[in-house]
Structures are given as structure tokens and as C-alpha cells.
Image (cartoon, rainbow, N blue to C red):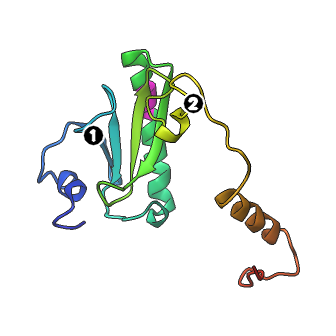
Amino acid sequence: MTDTCIFCQIARAAVPAHKLIEDDLVLAFLDLHPICEGHALINSKQHHPWFEDLPESTALRIMSTGQQLARAMKREWGAERVSAFYTGIHVPPAHAHVVPMFHRHDVTSARYLEDGFEEFSLPPSLGGAALAWQKLAEWKTQPQLGSDTLPEP
């Protein structure tokens, strides 16, 4: 934990929060700036700046806590779906958002709304990151390459 991180302060009860679920690894609490009623955050009790830094046991606990919250949100607010995603842009440590969805665009990107509120824009082609992932998948299937050998671009 760090002294200046707001989530670390919440985890050690130095800053108040409306706690929903707490155990030895994670703390779930209501978001102060919710997308909609019920929007919750799940944070590790240890300070991990990036999603990929989370220990597997903590990441699994965050997901299982998110499932518990999702079931409660569906019962409480009658939401058909609940969205879960990780971030850490505005507050540095990786944390999960769990949001009851009352409309299919409650947690969408503005990029998907270019064709209008009720439509989706389809990508014109696989490019950029998608091609990089495809190359990585092809590289992993080549038995002659070792795990420490990257193919030439």
C-alpha cells in the first residue's frame, strides 16, 4: 500500500467508503462518480499499478467478487446484464468496475456510437492490434521457435 493512493487509503479505512464486500485480498465499494446507480469498484488490498501486475489469486478473487455483485445487482435493480471491466486510468492501481446495465450503451465507448445511439459501427478490417495478435498466435504455433525467440518483423 502507498500513503498517497486513495484506494490504499480506503483499504486501510483511512478514508471512508460505502463497503459492499471485503475479505483478506479485495475490497468492493460503491463508486463516488457512478455511471449509474449501483456502480461498484473492486480493488486489491495491495497496490498493483497495472492489471497484469495482479497476482493470479487476487485477479480470480476480484472476478468472483464481481460475480457476487452482479447477482446482487440483478436482484436489486432488475438489470438484465452487468458489465465488468478493469481500468486504472484516473486512479493508478488496477481496479475492476462492476456496473448494472439498463441500456446496452451504459458502458460503451463513444467510438461505437459514431453511427448513432442505437447502432454499432463495424470495423472496416482487421488492422493494427488485431494483426499483431494474429501474428503472435501464428508465432506461438511454430514448433521450431523457442519461447525466447521472436520472429523477425
Label 1 sits on a secondary structure element that is strand
Task: Report the disc number at residue 20.
Answer: none
Query: Which quadrant of the view contains residue 53?
Result: bottom left
Query: So how many labels did they put on this image?
Result: 2
Q: Quadrant location of the C terminus?
A: bottom right
Lateral position of residue 115 relative to residue 2, left or right: right
Q: Is residue 73 above or below residue 131?
A: above
Q: Amino acid at mark 1?
A: Phe
**Residue at image location 33% in from the left, 32% down from the top:** 35
Query: Which quadrant of the view contains residue 121?
Result: top right
| Nearest the eye: 37 or 25 | 37
Q: Tag 2: Cα neighbours inside 10 Å, few (<14), some, or many (≥20)?
A: few
Task: Report the disc number at residue 29.
Answer: 1
Note whether residue 109 is visible.
no
Question: What segment is highlighted magenta in the picture?
Answer: 68-72
Percent position (x, y) of residue 20?
28, 35
Q: Quadrant location of the N terminus?
A: bottom left
Question: Which residue is tagged 2?
Answer: 115
Percent position (x, y) of residue 127?
70, 56
Percent position (x, y) of residue 34?
29, 34
Percent position (x, y) of residue 125?
74, 49
Measured in 3D between alpha carbons, the distance from the residue under mark 2 to the one under mark 1, in whole angstroms, is 35 Å
